[in-house]
Each structure stands twice: as C-alpha cells, then as structure tokens.
Amino acid sequence: MPARAASAARPIQACQRCRQYKVGCDRARPHCSRCSKSRADCIYIGSDVALAIKTISETVSRQPLQQPHSQLTPPDTETPRKDLSSRSASPPEGERPASAAPKGRYSPGSAHFRSADLIPAKNYLAQAAKRDRAILSCTRCRRHKVRCDRRTPCGRCMKNNKESECRYSEPPLPDAAAVPQKPYKSLHGIATTYIDHRWDNRFRNLTHWTILLQEHIKPIDIKEECKTSISGMSLSINFPLGNLNDDTITVEELLSQLPRRSIQRVFISYFMETIEKTYHIVDEAAYERELRAFWMPGSVTPEDWLGVHFVILSLGCQVYNHHAFRTGQDIYEALPVRLLSGAELCLKRTPFLFHPSLNIIKMLSLMVIAKQVYAMSCHQADTCWQLTGLVARLATSMGLRTDVPVSDEPTPYEEKMKRRVWTLAVYMEMKQSLVCGMPLLLRSSDMAALL
C-alpha cells in the first residue's frame, strides 16, 4: 500500500492572546485591534514557521524537472503542481507517470517525502503543536476535577460555602456567566476576585493614573507593608446601596451586633487617632455627649446617627486589626464587615435621598473612606466617584454652601458642622475626581463658598 504523505499543520496567523481567548484576530501588525483596544502585548508566535514554509515552497516550485524531452507530458494533460498545504490530497505514486516524477531527495512523488523535511533547521511540522488552552474553571473545581459554571463565585463554591476559595487563575469569559439564583450572594466578593478586561475601556481625562504612568519609561516599584486585606474583607461592588435588602431586621438586632462598651471605646480611640485627624468629620466633644446618651438605658437613637456610629466602629476596628496583626495579637476578622452591613441597613431606613441630614452626609462620607482604606480593585475605586458625587449633591440640596440654616431652630453646633461637612464634601469630590480621572462636577462658586 503506498505511503500516505503527512498533512502539513495549518500556519498560525492569529496573535497569541486572540488564540488563548478564542476570538477573531484581524492579524494587523505590529498590534491587532483587540490587543490595541485592551492595551495588551500582541505577540505572533507562528510567523517564523509560515515564512519558512513559504520560502521553501517557492524554492521547490522553481526547480526544473529532470526528465528527457521525448517523454514530456503534453501541456493539456500535465499534472498541475500543488502547494505544501495540499500534499495530503495528491494522488498516490502508482497513478503518476514514471517520466513525470522528478528526481531528488525532496521529490513530491517519493514515498519518503515529508513536508517537515523542507525545514532542516527546526522540525516544526514533524510533531503536532501543543494546544495552549485557556483555564476557565476556578482553582477549586480544577483541583477536585468537577465541572465549573464559571461564575464569580461559581455555584459549587457557593453551595459548599467556599466563596473565599473561588479564585480564577485566568479571567473567565464575559459571556459565560449566567444569571444566578441569588444575586446578592453572587455580588459578594466581586470586588476582590473578578477581573474585567473591559474596565479600562471608558472615558478618562488626562489626570487618570493610567495616563500619568505612560509618561514614565519604567514604573517605580513601591513596596507597601499591607497589600492585602488583613481581615479578608469582601464587600459588594454596590456597597452601600446594593447589598442587603432585608426589612425584617430591627434596630434591636442591629444593636445586638455591637461589641461591648470597652471594646467600642478602643475602636473609637483608634479612629480618632488616625482617620479623624485627616478628615475632621466628627466633633469629639459632641460625639462624646451623644455616646453617653446612647448608652443610657431606654434611650432612643436616630438611625442616621447609629449608621455613623457603625462606620466609625468598623474603621476603628480595621485600624486595630492592622496594629494587632503586626504585633501578633488576636484580630476581629469578621466584625468590620458586619458593622458596615449594619450601617448600610441604617442608611436604607432613612429618607436620605428625599430629606438628608448632617449625619447622613457624614455617614456616606465615612462609607467612601471605608471603600478606600481596604485593599480593593479598580472597580471599587471607580464606584467611589459616583458615591462622592451623591454626597456633594445631597450636601448641595441641603444648602450647606449657602447661609440657609439646616433646621428651623439652628444651634451653634449645627452651624459649625455645616461648614465642616461642606468642606469635607468638596474635598472628597475633588480628590476622587483626580484619582479616577473623571471630570469635577462642582462649580468655582461652590468652592468659593468655603472662603
């Protein structure tokens, strides 16, 4: 039986990134449109093989046939010459005329002919290329060798209460995610585990940090002491407006989540020594009087003040955990997230969009700080710009930039806090606009009110 010629491997023309994600590549050089749009490295790994095949093919086609003139085949019956990609479709050796078979080592009619023999330097085509498949399942499902639905987190990890272990070594495909049965559980942890390559495909001005880094040839390596969250915090990307919607939780149940009074004092002291010295959000003397009234038996606490107290305790607990972790002491791992969830419930029980108060402005400002202080992704950093815009607009609706009193019977404390809260809103709006590279939505007259 005549030997069958080995089929040549198809030349690789797409770039390595498009082949990995199994998407169409326009093969533009030096960067295809997809890699240029996502600002990724565009690497073509098969260009040298295709060039070698093309060069050798042209060399073989120019070689004259070694045969006598008396035995030449007429032009109308001459077998057409085939290229390398169609060697497997050529007729067997027995069907060719003996006089039409060219002599030499690389004769296409030879039984020992292989297309890989045309490349003596590197045997690219003799062995099949190893397929570089993209890893789509999470690491836990791959370790247990089970099917993964590629959600974030996936269904198996959610079923086994292993959301914290659901990690992807490669980013999951955007169209592979299905609608989960419980959306609030699916959003839990999205800020620290989900990576979206389309995050940077949005409008930015020239103050965004990705634009500023392009001015440097080599980025400066800065070693931080704490690059990850010590307490393993994982908030929803929509915090504080999209995580909890349970209306059955009462204020008494929220108060039962608070630690004992001595521990609250420790957290408050850590907050006053760190965050308060930077932002000047609360008045220490007034806050101390409100704490004594809050701890009195039978006291009724407004939910806007209770939300502020929850966020202060959460931020103070995070500072305490950072200090205790460095000194080897025990930390309160789950308490900061539980306190922030209580503050979120307190915010939703107030008419903050219709009738905001000074405590609501302070609560939202502290929530922005809470999103900024722990290790978060670029998604979380971008959501802070929308949240600071909400703070600035609520403060504007209260007339904090004008001389209009905030209540019917204003007190000296309210007049003092009115200017302080407006200064905080303007400062956070300007800072977040610079960090996110988004436009500043305040007028010059709004900032002139501080003078």
Image (tube, grey):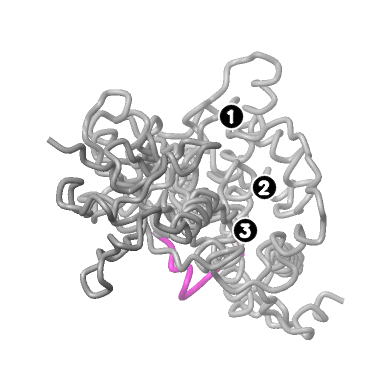
Question: Which residue is labeled 1 in the image?
Answer: 230
Q: Marks 1/2: CA distance?
A: 29 Å
Stretch in magenta: 349-359
Q: Which labelled disc corresponds to residue 365?
A: 3
Question: Magenta stretch containing residue 354, yes or no?
Answer: yes
Where residue 235 sits: x, y (%)? 46, 45
Above or below residue 79? Residue 186 is above
Look at the image and tell me in which quarter the N terminus lies: top left
Q: Marks 3/2: CA distance?
A: 17 Å
Question: Which residue is labeled 2 in the image?
Answer: 287
| Mark 3 or mark 1: whose residue is earlier in sequence | 1
Asked which secondary structure carries label 2, the reply is helix
Residue pictured at 58% horizontal, 29% vertical: 230
Given residues 329 and 345, the one toward you in this image is 329
Q: Marks 3/1: CA distance?
A: 23 Å
Q: Amino acid at mark 2?
A: Tyr
Asked which secondary structure carries label 1, the reply is loop
Q: Amino acid at mark 1?
A: Ile
Q: Are marks 1 and 2 in contact (CB under 8 Å)?
A: no
